[in-house]
Image (cartoon, grey):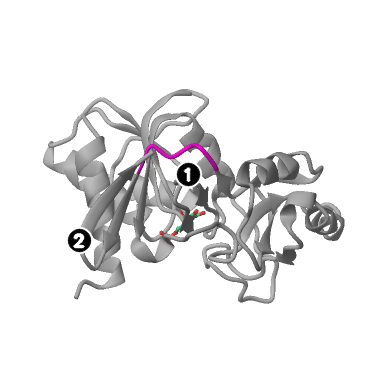
Amino acid sequence: MASQDELKKQVGYKAVDDYVKSGMVVGLGTGSTAYFAVERVGQKLKSGELKDIIAIPTSIRTKEQAASLGIPLTTLDTHSKLDVAIDGADSVDPALNLVKGGGGALFREKIVEMAAEKFIVIVDESKLCSGLGPHFPLPIEVLPFCVQHTMRCLEALPAMQGAKAVLRMGSSENNKSDGDEIAISDNGCYLVDMHFTSDIQDPVALAEQIVKTVGVVEHGLFTEMTTAVIIAGKEGISEKLA
Ligand code: 5RP
């Protein structure tokens, strides 16, 4: 049976093989699944199968990986439209809404992926859920100033359904709070993980309430953004289109 890493590699490679063509501006996601998509872009550029690709990374570590593979890089300031972006996710619901940000890169991921004509999500089947929320805590990036106050404001939002706010500790590269120091995002901000005990009833309404909360930089609800999800599972690879 394929290991979880092997499944991640399969979907990462397939996304690049199916959706990335020469001449494109490509958004490169963050995390252990997106890692393989970045690897594949690097391989295909080196072999000459892909030409004239320019990429926008969604985190410092993806930028470093892409640079180490010789992938030409740009920013949204220079290219504000992308042909395609490829990234992993922490949860995927039946409507292909996502929770992202387990790796702490949600702000850069969202700004890049919203600018892409196609947003391709790559996951193994453990990321599929019937409703967002209990499956994986919802990350929210916040300014450090008066973070406890911002956390109380978030907990009090009507659409938050009583979810508890936990300030992320440890390295933001980990998908859990496991250190003694507050995790710091690539943008110098904190990450708050909202723990739900029931499915989020209305992700769109919740997203609207979160962005109106002063102190919030961005949140990990990615609603109505997905073009396709490529899923690796025991039965092989499948694809769901939005
Ligand atoms: C990083 C993310 C990642 O895409 C998400 O956490 C999934 O990561 P992985 O592929 O390692 O499970 O949103 O901020």
From the image, give the main secondary structure of the stretch colored magenta.
loop
Residue 5 in the image, given as x and y percentages of width and height: 29, 67
- Position of residue 86 in the picture relative to residue 171 (left or right): left
Quadrant containing the N terminus is bottom left
Location of mark 1 (residue): 58
**Residue at image point 78% right, 54% down:** 154
Type of the residue with mark 2: Gly
Residue at mark 2: C-beta within 8 A of ligand 1:
no
Viewer-proximal residue among 193 and 163: 163
- The residue that label 2 is drawn on is 236
Q: In this view, does 227 lie above or below 90?
A: above
Q: What's drawn in magenta, residue-wise?
A: 223-228
Specify whether 213 is left or right of 114: right
Label 1: few (<14), some (14–19) or many (≥20) C-alpha neighbours in 10 Å: many
The percent position of residue 182, horizontal first and vertical second, equals 70, 66
108 versus 173 height, above or below: above
Point 81% across, 42% down: residue: 214
| Secondary structure category for the residue under label 2 | strand
